[in-house]
Amino acid sequence: MSARGTRSRCSAIAETLIDVDAGDDPATAGYVPRSTLRFAGECVDQVPGWIRLARIAQTDPDARVRGLPARLPVWRSTEPTRRGELHGLQTAYEALEARVDGDVRALAAAAGTDPGVVVQLRRVRAEMESAAEYANAISLRDAGPVDRGETRWRLLSALEHAFLLGQLVALPTLIEVANAHDAGGDVEPAARASWLQICPGWPVRDCDGTKLGLVQRVRGDRDTGEFHGLDVTSDIASAIVQVPPAAVALIDAGEVGLSVRGSELPR
């Protein structure tokens, strides 16, 4: 895996977010929303660690290096999503998508490339494109705070998939690790349905498939689009189990799946 490639992708994402914000509102250039600044800053801060891991992987491509594939930082926000933030994320995604799409095509056309690797790369690319298309479908000019929050969520998912795809192209042996994470539920909720679709009464299962109970309350801020978690209970007399957003791995078909065991959740 190219350490320089990882560094340039991370730096490009951070720089794009800052540059787009300045271009959208020149009068406030240098003063970006706190959520954008925090995300861009964490991208840059994590670069040295990612470079170290990438260099280890370069010397031994078959090694299972903890921390790879690398993940982008979590976007943290306590304010309604701004249109300028969406513009920045969209621009960052489009720039990265163009690079990794070309890399996937080149690898697929190269002699000796394992067909199974190409299939896996195309699957990740399809998930990336699906998230981006969903974001575009709901990012209307007159969208309210909830729709803007949902759009940001989907754009971050698309950006995360593009970032992952670049790593898998550079080091295809990471595909097995990425698949293992998926099988264990280690995926972003953004890759699934929206938390806004969850309803009280939906069954909740942990990573072992054990039913923990039913959703009693969905905690979130519809003004900002932020998901705060779930309250789950098995019956009226039982204690409430609090499920944090990071533990929600699957929202689908009237059911919620978790990435952790029930015993790991706070009560």
Image (tube, rainbow, N blue to C red):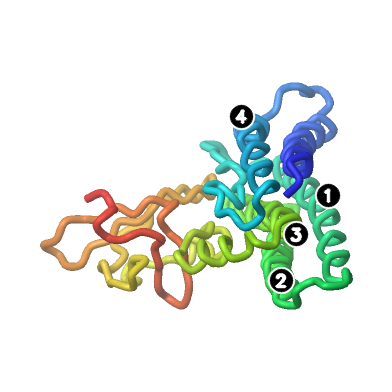
Report the amino acid beneath label 3.
Answer: Val
- Report the mark closest to the observer, 2 or 4: 2
Query: Between marks 3 and 2, how big is the CA–CA gap?
Result: 9 Å
Measure how far apart labels 2 and 1 are at the Cα level: 24 Å
Tag 4 residue: 34
Give the label on residue 263, or none: none
Q: Nearer the viewer, residue 12 or 106?
A: 106
Q: CA distance from mark 1 to mark 4?
A: 23 Å
Q: Disc 1, disc 3: CB below 8 Å?
A: no
The picture places residue 202, in percent across and down from the top left corner, at 35, 71
In percent of width and height, residue 125 lies at 73, 66
Amino acid carrying mark 4 in the image: Arg
**What is the number of the mark on residue 117?**
2
- Please say if the residues under marks 3 and 4 sit with CB atoms less than 8 Å apart: no
Quarter of the rendering containing residue 177: bottom right
Residue at position x 14%, y 61% in the image: 238
Residue nearest the observer in this picture, 222 or 101 = 101
Residue 59 point in image, percent of width and height? 68, 46
* Disc sitting over residue 95 in the figure: 1
Q: Earlier in the sequence, mark 2 or mark 1?
A: 1
Dot 2: few (<14), some (14–19), or many (≥20) neighbours within 10 Å?
Answer: some
Q: Are marks 3 and 2 in contact (CB under 8 Å)?
A: no
Marks 1 and 4 in Cβ contact (< 8 Å): no
Mark 1 or mark 3, earlier in chain:
1
Q: Residues within 10 Å of mark 4 (few under 14, many from 20)?
A: few
Q: Earlier in the sequence, mark 3 or mark 4?
A: 4
Tag on residue 169?
Answer: 3
Circle 4 SS class: helix
Dot 3, how many residues are within 10 Å of its Cα: few (below 14), some (14-19), or many (20+)?
many
Judge left or right: residue 161 versus residue 102: left
Helix, strand or loop at mark 3: helix
Label whose residue precedes the other's in the sequence (2 or 4): 4
